[in-house]
Image: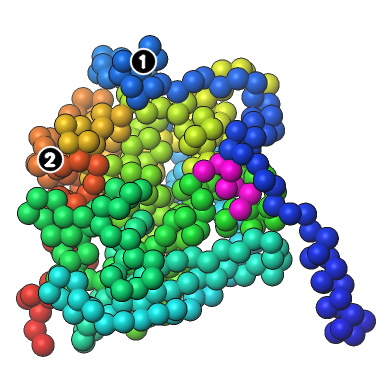
Amino acid sequence: MNSNSWLLVLTLALAAQPAPKEWTAAEDHRHMMERLGITALRPGPSGNEQAPNHANYDEARANPFPDLPEVLTLKNGRKVTTADMWWNERRPEIVEDFASEVIGRVPTNVPKVTWTVAAAMETTIGKYPVVGRQLAGRVDNSSYPAITVDIQMIVVTPAGVKRPVPVMIMFGGRGLPGLPGFVPAGSRGRNDAGAATGADSPATEQLIADGWGYVAISPASIQADNGAGLTKGIIGLVNKGQPRKPDDWGALRAWAWGASRALDYLETDRLVDAKTVGIEGVSRYGKAALVAMAFDTRFAVALVASSGEGGAKLHRRNWGEAVENLTASGEYHWMAGNFLKYGAADAAFGSRNAGDLPVDAHELIALCAPRPTFISYGIPEKGDAKWLDHQGSYMAAIAAGPVFRLLGARDLGRSDDYKTEKMPGVNVGLLDGQLAWRQHDGGHTDGPNWQYFIPWADKFLKHTPAARRGP
């Protein structure tokens, strides 16, 4: 067969491909329930404290499953006593459980991403001169042309640098004035870590002043933040517009995958020190930042802010948002389909709950070890709602500590008793180790913590701030 004949065969085959399914989130959610044999899910608690089914905020009832999976015990019962055992035996077990049951697997056949610079300019961030570039990452869709995925991001680095700089990849709406795709700080839909809070400069300005660069990446350009989008975006492209399998990735893993592709690009950028690239996010993007840090060991540092259930919060805690909220049709798309099993009231396999999960949030944090990982929260009085379970996230960080120590890093410097350890006071940072915690006195943002995060990261990444750097 000659080349023209092959081209004709390929053209006809592509033309015969079905269009992407146009489902609502409810339809997709119901399809996954049927596939798993689930006939009824338990309703999640309400965030409205006046509602009859309001979330629990009574610490006496907060720990119905008090014993967490042991992070340093293999499935065969052997204790993990060396770094080699962690890397070669225990860590792969935890990774597999998260991939199968919680956040889903990245398929082996995800297409290649090709980055192009769409625009570039020189401008200033505050008083600091910078170089900004708008990039698009085109995902190869030759196997299914009906879906196009172009990852949108902006790369900003200090102007005139003499050596490669560290960079923070930040999920959400920051950008650069004058470049397409810029979203002003504080715009709708963004819990903006870059927005000024009181006397704090925007995070972007603090980073540039210290000699860092930053990347603003658009999660929506990777995968939509709703169940109706699961047959589109990168998840839909790989599945050729068809519904997910139960262990397929959800949006959190897809957003994290997109951040890893951004890191691929930065590894080719002569202005960037690719060994000191960090990841940051707030709220749902805080969840994604933690997933990215946990699963891609190339990330050097993370700022995980106000991440709550599905992020740093323990699933086993009965406080605020619960597993049942994440298995409902409004949020299930963040997770693997298999995660729905843990909200099942009635199913072919019986019923399951948070206590049946093979892993919990402390193990997601542990996957980041020994790399510097900063857990950030605000306070409910300013809008970082009790719903997020600050104490449950602190407990998870405490329980992750033994892995950091095993790998030669420092943890929070407290005991390992996650059942009794209580959060330090507001604005009291535990910042001496590679695992760090600070609850600031602001709201649903990490804005007030950047002034602490940057010098903390500088210390562990051995980065000399620009103000102290010689010519």
Q: CA distance from mark 2 to mark 1?
A: 28 Å
| Image quadrant containing the C terminus | bottom left
In screen coordinates, is 174 left or right of 102? left
What residue lies at 79% left-to-right and 58% top-to-bottom? 17
* Residue 10 visible somewhere in the drawing: yes
- Determine the secondary structure under disc 2: loop
Q: Position of residue 357 (x, y in %)?
A: 48, 30
What residue lies at 65% left-to-right and 67% top-to-bottom? 141
In screen coordinates, is 23 left or right of 164? right
- Against 424, is 430 above or below? below
Answer whether residue 231 is magenta in the image.
yes
* Residue at numbered disc 1: 51
Residues packed near mark 1 inside 10 Å, few (<14), some (14 to 19) or many (20 plus): few
Q: Position of residue 81 (x, y in %)?
A: 35, 45
Which of the marked residues, 2 or 1, is nearer the chain's N terminus? 1
Residues packed near mark 2 inside 10 Å, few (<14), some (14 to 19) or many (20 plus): some
- Against 451, is 361 above or below? above
Q: Where is residue 199, by image quadrant?
A: bottom left
In screen coordinates, is 24 left or right of 15? left
What residue lies at 81% left-to-right and 64% top-to-bottom? 15
Q: Which residue type does callout 1 highlight? A: Ala
Task: Describe the colour scheme in one phrase.
Answer: rainbow
Q: Where is residue 212, by image quadrant?
A: bottom left
* Residue at numbered disc 2: 441
Q: Which residue type does callout 2 highlight? A: Asp
What residue lies at 52% left-to-right and 19% top-to-bottom? 42
Residue at the far right: name it.
1
* Residue 412 visible somewhere in the drawing: no
What is the magenta range? 226-232
